[in-house]
Amino acid sequence: MKVTKLLDGTPINKKEFLTWIKGLRSGKYSQTIGVLNNSAGFCCLGVACDLIIPPEKLHKDPVFIVGVIPGAQAGSPEWLKRIDRDVMVRNRMLGFSMYHDSLLCSSLTSVNDLGLYSFEDIANILEDIYVEGIYEGSYLDPVKITSHRVSGVL
């Protein structure tokens, strides 16, 4: 994993991060919007909460995970509470964003909640940023960007 911390210096737990990626690709989770978890399924960050936060620390109501972001979960690791903003900042710094019905989409919550990307696509985005380090450095590598595995630009 090339990127081991968020832009603000918060360290990313590699094992937890890779567990999340695997969970997004597992087919075990149905994708929903607007909340971490409801009767329709999980948002991408809800998958992380389900897999990473110990069951005894996971706040439910009593069936579904409470909240719209991991920050609503006291047991959430700090990097998970901040990763949505980190993705947004990295994408906006590099000029990556997409307009969808006049909304600027550059965070995990926006692409998930607008139904723009599947869990597989979101896993690819996370890998590109944190495993491959595609968005690292002071310039864009056009070969890396054009080989981006998500159809469209985040």
Image (tube, rainbow, N blue to C red):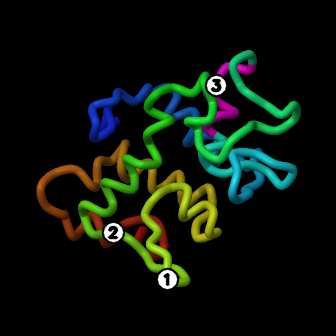
Residue 20 relative to residue 91: left or right: right
> Which span is picked out in magenta?
48-55
Q: Earlier in the sequence, mark 2 or mark 1?
A: 2
Foreground pick, 107 / 31: 107
* Residue at mark 2 to residue at mark 1: CA–CA distance: 15 Å
- Element type where label 1 sits in the image: loop
Q: Residue at x 27, y 55 (%)?
A: 135
Question: Residue 74's image quarter?
Answer: top right
Point out the frontmost of discs 1 and 3: 1
Residue 55 relative to residue 113: left or right: right
Q: Amino acid at mark 3?
A: Ile
Point out the frontmost of discs 2 and 1: 1
Question: Residue 116's image quarter?
Answer: bottom right
* Residue 53 disc label: 3
Q: Residues within 10 Å of mark 2 (few under 14, many from 20)?
A: some
Q: Residues within 10 Å of mark 3 (few under 14, many from 20)?
A: some
* Residue at mark 3 to residue at mark 2: CA–CA distance: 30 Å
Q: Earlier in the sequence, mark 3 or mark 2?
A: 3
**Image quadrant occupied by the N terminus:** top left
- Element type where label 3 sits in the image: loop
Q: Residues within 10 Å of mark 1 (few under 14, many from 20)?
A: few
Q: Which residue is mark 2?
A: 96
Foreground pick, 37 / 147: 37
Q: Amino acid at mark 2?
A: Phe
* Residue 4 disc label: none
Q: Residue at x 28, y 54 (%)?
A: 134
Q: Is residue 52 found inside the magenta-colored segment of the image?
A: yes
Q: Which residue is mark 1?
A: 102
* Residue at mark 1 to residue at mark 3: CA–CA distance: 35 Å
Q: Is residue 108 visible?
A: yes
| Residue placed furthest toward the bottom | 101
